[in-house]
Each structure stands twice: as structure tokens, then as C-alpha cells.
Image (cartoon, rainbow, N blue to C red):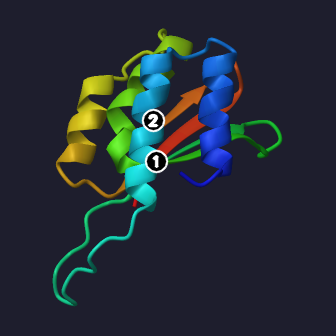
Amino acid sequence: MPETEETMRVLNLVAEAKISPEEGAKLLTALEQASSPRIQPAPNEPTAPRWFRVRVTDLATGKTKVNVNLPTSLVEVAIRMGARFAPDLEGVNYGDIVEQVKGGAQGKIIEVEDVERSERIEIHVD
């Protein structure tokens, strides 16, 4: 497995005990699968969404605080991990997000503004 920035991030999360070794193994496996060569679809065949992108932006400055890009194969693991860090987000059903991604949804899936923290959270699939 090649040493990539994503691999190092996962290993650091395990080392810092932010995720379990089992979750880390799942993430590494999914990263390896995402980087393996794939058969190109026929020209008229629609492509499945490949990336799950999460952006957190400071509302006051407009600067990006968090910018995470994950292969869609990691969505379930990522949602479970993310829910630990933001369990109090009102009106967000994490299961619905996973189902939308599995169903082939593309584009902006969710946009939430947290006025107290002065943050905008956006999730895109493409």
C-alpha cells in the first residue's frame, strides 16, 4: 500500500485514539480499494458518485476550517465517526445521508449553519 496523505491521517487518528484500530483498518482497506485501477464505464453509462466531500466554513471570515474528501466507499464509517464529534446537530439524520449516497445522489446533500459556532457545514457527493 503506497504511503499517501490519507493513509497517514488514518494512522494518526488511530495513534491519537480518535478512532479504534478496527475503524482504521476499514478506512485503510477502503482507501486501498479506492486507489486500485478500475474499469472505465461505457461513454453513455452514468458514473457512480466517487467522492464524499465535507466542508466547514467560518461564517464570519468565509475561510475554510475543515476540508475532507473521502471515497464514497467510506461514507458509513465516516458518518459514524463524524457523529461522535457533532452529536447535537439538530435536524440532521445521519442515516438519511448514508441512504442518499448509496442511492446514487450527487451534488449538495446537506448544508447546515451553526450560528452559535459561526460555521457552515456542507456535504457534497460527486
Q: Is residue 53 left or right of residue 37?
A: right
Above or below for 64 versus 22: below
Local crowd size for mark 2, using a 10 Å CA cut-off: few (<14), some (14–19), many (≥20): many
Mark 1 and mark 2 in contact? Answer it, CB < 8 Å: yes
* Cα distance between the residues tagged 1 and 2: 6 Å
Residue at x 25%, y 25% (from the top left corner)? 95
Residue marked by disc 1: 31
Q: Is residue 47 left or right of residue 67?
A: left
Residue type for callout 2? Leu
Judged from the image, the secondary structure of the residue bearing numbered disc 2 is helix
Above or below for 1 versus 17: below
Residue 97 occupies quadrant: top left
Residue type for callout 1? Leu
The quarter of the rendered structure image containing the C terminus is bottom left
Residue at x 37%, y 20% (from the top left corner)? 91
Where does the image place residue 32, in percent across and percent down from the top left? Answer: 44, 50
Q: Depth check: give the residue in front, 59 or 65.
A: 65
Residue marked by disc 2: 27
Judged from the image, the secondary structure of the residue bearing numbered disc 1 is helix
Local crowd size for mark 1, using a 10 Å CA cut-off: few (<14), some (14–19), many (≥20): many
Q: Given the current orientation, which residue lies at the most extreme front position? A: 1
Where does the image place residue 103, in percent across and percent down from the top left? Answer: 17, 48
Above or below for 56 versus 13: below
Q: Depth check: give the residue in front, 47 or 119.
A: 47
Residue at x 38%, y 28% (from the top left corner)? 77
